[in-house]
Amino acid sequence: MSVLVVGSIALDHIKTPLEEHQNLLGGSASYASVAASFYSPVKLVGIVGEDFPNEHIELFKRRNVDIAGLQVVPGKTFRWSGEYMWDLNIRETRSVALNVFEHFNPTLPETYKDTPVVLLANIAPDLQHHVLDQVRLPRFVVADTMDLWIDTARVRLLELLARVHMLILNDGEARQLTGETSLIKAARRLRDMGPEYLAIKKGEHGCLLFGDNGQFFSCPAFPLEDIHDPTGAGDTFAGGLAGYLARYSTKVEFGALRRAVVHGSILASYNVEAFSLERLQTVTRDEISERFDTFRRLSEFDAE
Amino acid sequence: MSVLVVGSIALDHIKTPLEEHQNLLGGSASYASVAASFYSPVKLVGIVGEDFPNEHIELFKRRNVDIAGLQVVPGKTFRWSGEYMWDLNIRETRSVALNVFEHFNPTLPETYKDTPVVLLANIAPDLQHHVLDQVRLPRFVVADTMDLWIDTARVRLLELLARVHMLILNDGEARQLTGETSLIKAARRLRDMGPEYLAIKKGEHGCLLFGDNGQFFSCPAFPLEDIHDPTGAGDTFAGGLAGYLARYSTKVEFGALRRAVVHGSILASYNVEAFSLERLQTVTRDEISERFDTFRRLSEFDAE
């Protein structure tokens, strides 16, 4: 089965305390579609300007990402600039230029409309709705979001939650959206809003997965010593997760979701080892399997 | 095998946003010794004043805690008063009265001196050294500490680290003691200071365990919705861990330490369900086994 990914495609300018790089491939759909491509065929929906470097198009092609839904239009590609503070946990946005993204009106190619798994990566809820409107009977829909939309598009975001099978957000956003400090209480509130499944990302503390009937999974974080660029970790997580789920032609069960969360975490842990999508371009299936084994050892313990 | 526990014994005054209670049994040795008693015989070392309620002595006796090393002296028992903010994650100390603790000079009864497992629960490093000086060839020594001692007794604390097999501290303290923001780097620095094993507690995010040759265990947190009083969670964790280890007459292996961390986490998760040691007095072996099974389900996932 294949997965449809819609989200932003950007040219990033990123500064960390040690390095600074410009014109990097970025955006939620870039990270998510390349991450998903390790597991399933991907159909990308997005928009770029005429300045978008061909090498990035070639990267999508190399990863067998279907770009029939990628619009290349007159104007400039969406640009984002951010700076990380010394411990890389705090990020400040320096500038945002929507450019061609401002008038993005995604129209799905006919070949996209029956994609069984849909990842609504992080973009405005209006655009997520608009894409979802065009998909016929998707089997599993995952939505990612961010604090910006909770602040500025809350009503549309809440409407979206009623339409998706799974929501992904981070711990701060879960608290922001529900007003609950306890993540366990926040999770119940969020699942009451619609999504059957919920993943709460906690950065260096791993991820919590919630399902029906108290089903719960605590995914550890991979113990990374050196993080070079946290950009796109969440998008990569969502892409790896959705791509893994698209492998399954049967109904999504909680056991498959546990493994999907682990695979999302593995790809995210590789992604932050280098800037932009550099590491996602070199990571191999063997390396993914190796880290999967490490994740299993991280949290295992014998019976009493 | 039995475990020797030295630490503070206090009468606490605790205020949360919902409740306020006075004259509660508290102190690191109280929590730790009762927690350890679920697994192994405990020998308690501590000091209280003549005002110490007999019911608390009876509690220790009921839990088969040996109180030959508990000094009851003229004067008042150590008193601590603290208040928790609305989300229970932030605590402010309102007052501390050392009282009889000020001139505490622990002298071990002869029957204590060959105890194979020693838990130096959270007290001044000088007192931890003094107790350790009197134990003959302990097989496994665990030390707990807190930010106060990192600030005020750093040199003595560093000297202690060279003498113990395992150190327990929380994430903020690990960063404070090493100056490293990465917990992975902080862990390596701390293990270089002496202890072969290290547990870094992360509150609602669980606990990390580090050993030789990159051995690593990430223990999830039990998903608690309602926490009534976080006081003593860390002491209970340390006590459960040390008590569980004392079950083993052979050399401590990393596999046993993984389970010990889980048992410490289980008892801590019960402890915060009520004020003082109330919950530790009612929790049963069956409940502990039940939560052990839950911990196993929390983090398990199948092979790819």
Image: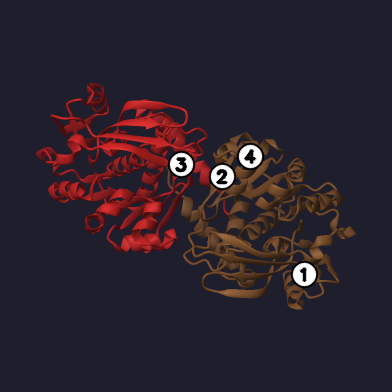
Chain colours: A red, B brown
Q: Compute the Cα span from label 1 to label 2.
A: 39 Å
* Viewer-side residue, A148 vs A167: A148
The disc placed on residue B178 is 4
Q: Nearer the viewer, residue B171 or A239?
A: B171
- Measuring 69% from the left and 40% from the top, which residue is drawn there? B196
Q: Earlier in the sequence, mark 4 or mark 2?
A: 4
Residue at image x 39%, y 40%? A92
Q: Are marks 4 and 2 on the same chain?
A: yes
Asked whether disc 1 touches disc 2, contact meaning CB atoms under 8 Å apart, the reply is no
* Quadrant (top left/top right/bottom left/bottom right) for the N terminus of chain A: top left
Which label's residue is closer to the chain start, 1 or 4?
Answer: 1
Asked whether the beta carbons under mark 1 and mark 3 sit within 8 Å of each other, the answer is: no
Whether residue A22 is visible here, answered yes or no, is yes
Q: Nearer the viewer, mark 1 or mark 2?
A: 1
| Residue B271 appears left or right of A40 | right
Q: What x and y, as percent, mark residue B114?
A: 84, 53
Q: CA distance from mark 2 to mark 3?
A: 23 Å
Residue type at mark 3 is Asn
Dot label at residue B77:
1
The picture places residue A261, in percent across and down from the top left corner, at 38, 46
Q: Which residue is tagged 2?
A: B217
Q: Residue flagged by tag 4: what amino acid is it?
A: Thr
Image marks 1 and 4: residues in contact by CB distance under 8 Å: no
Secondary structure at badge 3 equals loop
Q: CA distance from mark 3 to mark 4?
A: 18 Å
Q: Are marks 2 and 3 on the same chain?
A: no
Q: Which callout, 2 or 3, points to the residue nearer the camera?
A: 3
Provide the secondary structure element on which disc 4 rests. Answer: helix
